[in-house]
Amino acid sequence: MKKFRNQFGFTLIEMMVVLLIISVLILIAIPNVTKHSATIDQKGCQAYVKMVQGQVEAYRMELNGVPTVQNLVDTEYLNADQITCPDGSALSIDSSGVVSSITVIE
């Protein structure tokens, strides 16, 4: 058989080394992504609670009372799909008007 000169390409061993390196990098990156995902959900819920607290204060100034979550929806301070945090936690309002997050068990 003739041997061709100046052939360019990758050998099987080179391809396997590259795949091994990529696999190791993915195994290192995935745990960090999932850890940050939980932190993002928590911070998103905290920001959402502050937004709802602002709506509670607006309700208290206009209607002189402490609302429930359903009162906020009925008077259009919140939409019906805005009664839970992005992470699935339910929202409740206590007597001082502070919104607290309670985890929903599914």
Image: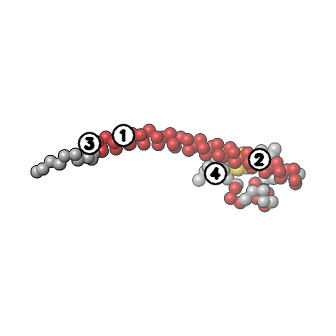
Q: In the structure shown, which secondary structural element does the residue marked by tag 2 occupy?
A: helix
Q: Reading the chain from its start, which is encountered first: label 3 or label 4?
A: 3
Mark 1 is on which residue type? Ile
- Reading the image, the residue beneath label 3 is 13
Q: Reading the chain from its start, which is encountered first: label 1 or label 4?
A: 1
CA gap, disc 3 and disc 1: 12 Å
Camera sees residue 101: no
Question: Which one is in front in this view, the residue at disc 2 or the one at disc 3?
Answer: 3
Tell me the number on the disc at residue 21: 1
Q: In the structure shown, which secondary structural element does the residue marked by tag 1 occupy?
A: helix
Q: Reading the chain from its start, which is encountered first: label 3 or label 1?
A: 3
Q: In the structure shown, which secondary structural element does the residue marked by tag 4 occupy?
A: loop
Mark 3 is on which residue type? Ile
- Reading the image, the residue beneath label 4 is 86
Mark 2 is on which residue type? Gln
Pick the residue in front: 102 or 13: 13
CA gap, disc 3 and disc 4: 47 Å
Question: Which one is in front in this view, the residue at disc 3 or the one at disc 4?
Answer: 3
**Residue 6 in the image, given as x and y percentages of width and height:** 22, 45
CA gap, disc 1 and disc 4: 36 Å
